[in-house]
Image (cartoon, rainbow, N blue to C red):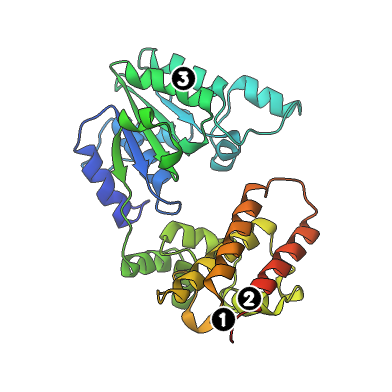
Amino acid sequence: MNAENPAWITEQTRSLLAQRGHAWLLSGPAGLGQYELALGLVKAWLCEQPQADAACGQCASCHAIDVRTHADLCVLMPETWMLDLGWPLSEKAQADLDDKKRKPSKEIRIEAMRDAVDFSQRTSARGRGKAVLVYPAEDMNAFTANALLKTLEEPPGDVRFVLASEAAHQLLPTIRSRCLVHTMVWPDASSSLAWLGAQGLEPAQAAVALKAQGGRPQAALHWAQSGQDSAHWAALPQALARGDLQALRDWAPQQLVSAQQQLCHDLMALAVDGQPRFFSAKDLPRGVPLAVLSEWSVRLQAHRRTMDHPFNPGLFIEALIAQAHTALAKSVS
């Protein structure tokens, strides 16, 4: 078993390695391990002594991937992701950033895709074929996606592709149709909590983090490691209902928009006799009319689309809290 990955990722790796295909699309919401599964696959494909469920982790090929220097692996990501995950940029892209000619791209650039197409047509350096990893695949623009499509339609014989996506519906239908689609496994709560405990989270913290992230264990771990506080999360609904700016002054706009969308979801679920997904029912205000929640949800969607705009963060947060207070003031508790 691969000790670096949780059991549900190892099991999926084993299943996919037993199947044939030149292109995989890993699909599911964020926080289920698409990137880890994709990396595990390409590592096993290129490994000199692969096991049934993982790469050996010891050979020269595995070491080359670990240090981000494997000649037969091409990684396509937005430059922001590449930098966060330690993957090297092309010489030209790195020079542009060093010279401050531009900022790191938040989408997969056409220049990087062209390099990948050239890479796919070259001879394997280590003799075990080549692999292209694309993540998040939905961050390809139209030009990048069309360039990839042409290669998927007529793939060179010794290259395999794995596209990992957290929004596969945004991909071109023609790209989806040329891949074997794997829907990510959603682990049960007990497995997720056990894994979070192994990562150092206390049981109570792990339970709140998992709830806050809708049952997605890796998203829960990131949430906890980012400094989110369990008590603050439980207090958020009532703080918004009061319009308590002081209690929410440390929240980033992106965090607050996301948290309000989760709260709105749970309140809409309660309004139709459903169960909350992200908060405990005891922490939620009751009786907010569904029509009010629907209007609030539309406003939050609009805010999410403009979060990258250089608004004044303080004023943006004040506006978010005021809108939430207006909606939740109509509750009966």
Above or below — where is 142 with respect to 63? Answer: above
Give the residue at mark 1.
285
Q: Is residue 310 left or right of residue 207?
A: right
Q: Are marks 2 and 1 in contact (CB under 8 Å)?
A: yes
Q: Which amino acid is tagged 1?
A: Pro
Q: Residue at x 49, y 70 (%)?
A: 268
Residues at marks 2 and 3, CA–CA distance in whole angstroms: 48 Å
Nearer the observer, disc 2 or disc 3?
2
Q: Residue furthest front?
A: 291
- Report whether residue 53 is seen: no
Q: Report the Cα–Cα distance between label 3 and label 1.
A: 50 Å
Mark 3 or mark 1, which has the lower sequence index? 3
- Mark carried by residue 328: 2
Q: Mark 3 and mark 2 in contact (Cβ < 8 Å)?
A: no
- Residue at far bottom of view: 333
Q: Which mark identifies residue 147?
A: 3
